[in-house]
Amino acid sequence: MDDRIVIDGSIGEGGGQVLRTSLSLAALLGRPFEIHNIRLNRSRPGLRPQHLAAARALATVTGAELAGDRENSTSLLFAPQGVTGGNYRFSIGTAGSVTLLATALLPPLLFAPRPSSLVLEGGTHVPFSPVFHYLREIFLPFLRRMGAEVEADLDRWGWYPRGGGSCTIRVRPCRSLRALRVPRRGRLRDLTLTLGLAGLPLHIVDREEKRVRTCLGQKGYALAGRFEPAPSPGQGNVLFLRAEYEESLAGFSVLGKRGRRAEQVADELCRQWLRFEEGTGSVDKHLADQILLYMALAAGDSLLTAEEVTSHLSTNIQVIQQFLPVRFSIDPATLAVAVSGVARAPVESGAPQA
């Protein structure tokens, strides 16, 4: 009997996240799936190089059969065999996001029978995706809080459009994930600003740091600042703000670009964080949708309070619920997102997947 799952790639926000979440869960569960209308809501529908890289990487780590894996294809069949873990190197070949590739690979590798090491090549700080610093300093600490053992190192920065960046991800299998409960963020403990720059005049980061300090200082906030040289094949600039609270973490980033003054970049970063700080969310809007899959896999009842219910969040819920017997709830008044997880156990070496 064919137990494949059929996904409509145009549901919700209709972007690449529908594909990545489907690939991750199919790989983890050993369930074949087919997806149609891939990225139908985008200006250039179908598979782009970064989406092909995710599909082919997950096919490699699961011995999957792939059909439709070509650029611009709007349909894909993925039939995995089983996750084994191991050492891998995957190159996107463009400035496609290595962080999005990492988040697609992590769920199955967390439950593999042996450790894994990934070298991922592409864009590390590029538009429309979490920057590497967000992965390392916000997302992975939350995963560790749930019992996962994942570490990430930035080997070489990669900016749009050149790419050429590289990171190393190390994953140890976990027996199970603990439920995540973050109903509130608590008192602000620390603000840290990271400024990255490659191939551009140093006065840019000096102006950015001064502007952020002035903006937040006027509101009564102090912050630590650190400059990171960003060896890279291309030019780029990023501001990343890490906010540490008693019970949570949040991260905010802005990329500099030609024609945008340093002060404008700094002002946008301040707006992002102040909007969050003045709200009631326990986690930022990006973490809210990225951590949902792990909440669904964990043992017990998970709960967080979203900064906002984005289209990414609601879309990810729809996809997860097609693969797993879970039901998320969202309180419209408080934006509390809750789910009872399935208590996923690891795959034993040599054992078939459920």
Image: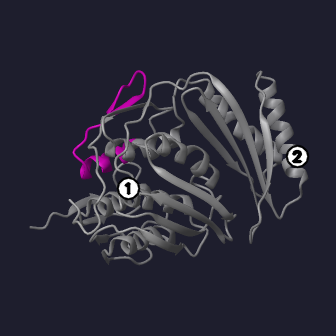
Please state which amino acid type lies under the numbered disc 1.
Thr
On-image quarter of the C terminus: bottom left
Residue 74 visible to the viewer: yes
Sequence order check: which comes first, mark 2 or mark 1? 1
Please give the label number shown on residue 37. none
* Location of residue 59 (image quadrant): bottom left
10 Å neighbourhood of mark 2: few (<14), some, or many (≥20)? Answer: few
Is residue 305 placed above or below 235 in the rendered structure? above
Quarter location, residue 123:
bottom right
The quadrant where residue 14 appears:
bottom left
Numbered disc 1: secondary structure: helix
User: Circle 1 is placed at which residue position?
Assistant: 21
In this rendering, is residue 62 above or below 220?
below
Residue 334: within the magenta? yes
Residue at 39%, 69% (x, y): give it: 58
Q: Which residues are magenta?
A: 314-338
- Location of the N terminus (image quadrant): bottom left
Mark 2, residue position: 206
Which color scheme is applied? Answer: one colour
Q: Determine whether, in the image, residue 44 is placed left or right of residue 206.
A: left
The count of marks equals 2
Q: Left or right: where does residue 52 sit relative to residue 141? A: left
**In the rendered structure, does residue 336 fall within the stretch colored magenta?**
yes
Disc 2 marks a residue whose amino acid type is Asp
Q: CA distance from mark 2 to mark 1?
A: 39 Å
Q: Secondary structure at mark 2?
A: helix
Q: Is residue 333 left or right of residue 246?
A: left
331, 85: nearer the viewer: 85
